[in-house]
Amino acid sequence: MQIVREQDVVLFRNRVREYSTKIGMSLVNQTKLITAASELVRNMLKYANGGQVVIEIISKSAQNGVRLTFTDQGPGIADIQQAMQDGFSTGKSLGLGLPGAKRLVNEFDIQSKPGEGTRVTVIHWKHGR
Amino acid sequence: MNTTAQLLHSKKKTILESWMSNQLSDQGLRDDLISNEELHKQSDELLNGLARAMATGNTDNIYAAEYEPITEILSDISITRARQGFSPRETGMYVLSLKKAIADALEQELAGQHEQLYKEVMMVNRLLDSLSVVTFETFIKGREEVILRQSDEISEISTPVIKVWEGILALPIIGTLDSARTQVVMESLLQEIVNTGSNIAILDISGVPAVDSLVAQHLIKTVSATRLMGAECIISGIRAEIAQTIVHLGIDLSNIKTKASLASALQLAFSMNRIEVKSHSKSTTFGFKR
Amino acid sequence: MDRIPILKLGPFLLVTIQVDLYDRLALNLENDLITMVSKTGARGVLIDISAVSIVDSFMGRILGNIASMSGIMDAQTVVVGMQPAVAITLVELGLTLQGVHTALDVEKGMELLQDKIGPDYLQEQDEEEELDDRTE
């Protein structure tokens, strides 16, 4: 799914909700996943003027989960460690986006090179563990 | 087409029978958990599938498409057996006893042709070994599911939210607080706050064996979430040694209302909700009567 | 452009958010609300988010902004009716909405506001009535 405008955020969130409802995720876990997704998609819009998100249902040892892959061709992140710290922001936000999103989901992976874009993958399992 | 595949086709009945008798002769067989007919049906299905799969010539890669129906039947059997409470031995023997049945049939068929017999037996061995690994894997997976469900049940049972007064909830926590548990505690507490419209929640940690910084963090999270909902949270049941560790670890609980006992927490809750509880003293009643 | 309606209830303003906000809408709300506070001299702002299923850090920041902005104009902000799942998520996110008061529902939020403004609110109302008399 392409994300280019602000309005896409709400659409995208509804799509994530559909998928997580499909595998029977509990409300709290759904909310966590969607909030994390919302943070990441907002980052993508703000710093890279949009990008692409892939929503997938995956399963591992008797457990289903939702995997979201965010890819953009933005400026990239120079210092990932710094970006993952609470309260660090190059824009004028709270600096909770990346670290907060990481706390909300079960698995979180970020890869980025300055000038080449950023790719963030998150996985949230049905039972949240 | 190899000999075993042909044999499976032509002598299916004999093999099935000897397999069945192998299974039935096993002392560990639980005929209370599964009926003979059912076992017969399952085994028949599996043999059919095996014959078909081996006829394709593929005899070692059980993850190939030809073997899908077989692994499916086996997984199905092992998972149901795991749930019904079969022992791993019984489940494992199911496949392993087939080995003997086929080997016997092969021996009869290929009497005298030692080299061929050896080759076929080895092949059957390898194949059934990998199939029994599949059985074990799925058996354990089935057991893990049972465990997962039970631990969910336990965490649900162990977090009762009690309404102690109009507008006041109490939640005694017993046992260690890990992050999964905290989530369950939070969920049930917050839901109950909404359901009852309570504005005060008392978290009693008398039953928590130890409070380290992680547990404290979970407690602080619960308190913050309660506050976001618009209710106040009091933590009670803080024992002397817990107070000591909290201070030694440098955990800041100053933003949280804490009380030593549930009774004093309740008192605080009463005064916050402007509730007065009075005991009728006997002297006044006497005085009234007079 | 969509707008979230703001209701005036005596000295308070009441906003009920019924839809999932996208950014523009949230920023509009912030603007409208602050303008309304200064125009009406409201003493309290009630924001009902019981229908909101997702509050991310952006929404959290808007709520915080509204609270501190109206705080400067001497109006208290109460956020009411937060969903349990939202509260848990916010805490996990690390957002505790400092400076924002919370209440379970609109009714309790109203009580809280009345408590907060307390006696000088009554006084002020008397004065207002006097003013009204004069203008009439």
Image (cartoon, grey):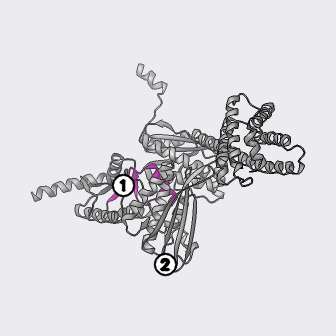
Q: Position of residue A37 (x, y in %)?
A: 48, 61
Name which residue type carries label 2.
Answer: Pro
Name which residue type carries label 1.
Answer: Val
Please state which of residues A25 and B265 is positioned toward the viewer in this rendering.
A25
Disc ID at residue B134:
none
Q: Is residue C97 magenta?
A: yes
- The residue carrying mark 1 is C78
Q: Position of residue B6 (x, y in %)?
A: 75, 45
Q: Is residue B289 magenta?
A: no
Question: Mark 1–mark 2 contact, CB under 8 Å?
Answer: no
Sort mark 1 into few (<14), some (14-19) or many (20+) by Cα contacts within 10 Å. many
Question: Is residue C95 at least partly visible in the picture?
Answer: no
- Chain under callout 2: A
Kindly indicate whether the residues beneath marks 1 and 2 are on one polypeptide chain: no
Q: Position of residue B116 (x, y in %)?
A: 85, 50
Please state which of residues B183 and C39 is positioned toward the viewer in this rendering.
B183
A90 left or right of B101 in image? left
- Helix, strand or loop for disc 1: strand
- Helix, strand or loop for disc 2: loop
Disc ID at residue A75:
2
- Chain under callout 1: C
B209 left or right of A19 in image? right
Q: Quadrant of the N terminus of chain A?
A: bottom left
Sort mark 2 into few (<14), some (14-19) or many (20+) by Cα contacts within 10 Å. some
Which range of residues does the magenta coloring cover? C74-103
Residue A69, placed above or below residue B24: below
Q: Position of residue C130 (x, y in %)?
A: 16, 55
Task: Give the residue at the far bottom of this rendering.
Answer: A115
- In the rendered image, which quarter is residue C32 located in? bottom left
Question: Is residue B278 at least partly visible in the picture?
Answer: yes
- Of badges 1 and 2, the one in the foreground is 2
